[in-house]
Image (cartoon, helix red, strand yellow):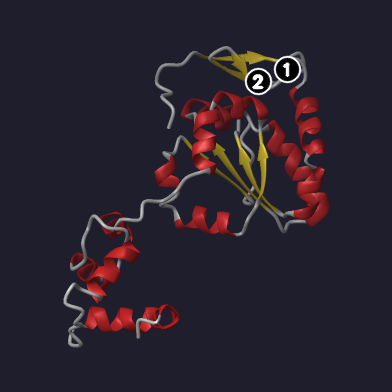
């Protein structure tokens, strides 16, 4: 994540008496009328909201655009919707909870998470697999551009060693220990199944298991 420990932060009040966070001299909402600005942003994304009842919003600020998104989602989908918001700045999030806080069970905010930690969260990953509509909050996206681009382009590590912390089964964990930890998982399994000698120990339960798993692909490759 971008280094956020050295930043300027203050809270201003808009002409309409709404709180506005200012990070590194960037106003995350309009200093004149945050609600009007938020409504205009969501109006530009009406097509996404009509097509998707699940949204991934990049940037929270104080959530005025989230409030507007909820109005449109409820009009279109009733209570059958979900909004997941990513906010890189912990201070912005803590003040959002103090000043605005949207009490809605359909809204979930991830705040100040490292990108790798987000992708360790099964609920978050499963949400992404549902292909939610993506809406960027312009001021936040521009401020944390590297973070959000990293989030959207993230590629999980594939080495055997990187899988260990996700494994709950002792059997699978033991099986992984027998593989080359530095190889990607597919290559490591392939190396285990087809050692240089070309012989497979049929008493090895790990090998037997993976033989069944990859049988179809082996037949296609002409290796069985």
- Report the quarter where the C terminus lies: bottom left
Q: Which mark is residue 97?
A: none
Q: Secondary structure at mark 1?
A: loop
> Residue 119's x, y, as percent?
44, 50
- Report the quarter where the N terminus lies: top left
For residue 149, side relative to residue 69 (left or right): left
Report the residue at 63% width, 13% height from top.
Answer: 12
> Residue 63's x, y, as percent?
65, 33
* Residue nearest the viewer, comparing 198 with 212: 198
Which quadrant would residue 99 be assigned to in this image? top right
Q: Which residue is mark 1?
A: 17
Within-10-Å neighbours for mark 1: few <14, some 14–19, many 20+: few
* Residue nearest the viewer, comparing 51 with 69: 51
Q: Which residue is mark 2?
A: 19
Q: Are marks 2 and 1 in contact (CB under 8 Å)?
A: no
Q: Secondary structure at mark 2?
A: strand
For residue 117, side relative to residue 18 (left or right): left
> Residue 40's x, y, as percent?
81, 31
- In the image, is residue 200 above or below residue 113? below
> Residue 95's x, y, as percent?
54, 26
């Amino acid at each position: 994540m971008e280094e956020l420990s050295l930043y300027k932060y203050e809270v201003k009040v808009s002409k309409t008496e709404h709180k506005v966070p200012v990070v590194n001299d960037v106003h995350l909402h309009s200093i004149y009328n945050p609600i009007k600005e938020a409504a205009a942003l969501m109006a530009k994304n009406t097509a996404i909201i009509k097509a998707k009842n699940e949204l991934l919003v990049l940037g929270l600020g104080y959530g005025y655009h989230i409030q507007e998104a909820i109005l449109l989602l409820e009009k279109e989908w009733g209570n059958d919707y979900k909004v997941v918001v990513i906010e890189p700045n912990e201070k912005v999030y803590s003040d959002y909870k103090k000043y605005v806080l949207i009490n809605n069970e359909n809204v979930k905010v991830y705040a100040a998470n490292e990108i790798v930690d987000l992708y360790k969260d099964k609920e978050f990953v499963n949400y992404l697999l549902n292909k939610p509509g993506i809406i960027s909050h312009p001021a936040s996206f521009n401020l944390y551009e590297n973070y959000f681009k990293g989030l959207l382009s993230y590629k999980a590590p594939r080495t055997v060693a990187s899988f260990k912390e996700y494994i709950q089964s002792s059997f699978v964990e033991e099986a992984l220990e027998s593989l080359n930890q530095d190889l990607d998982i597919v290559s490591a399994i392939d190396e285990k199944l087809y050692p240089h000698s070309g012989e497979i120990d049929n008493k090895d339960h790990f090998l037997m298991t993976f033989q069944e798993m990859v049988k179809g692909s082996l037949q296609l490759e002409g290796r069985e």
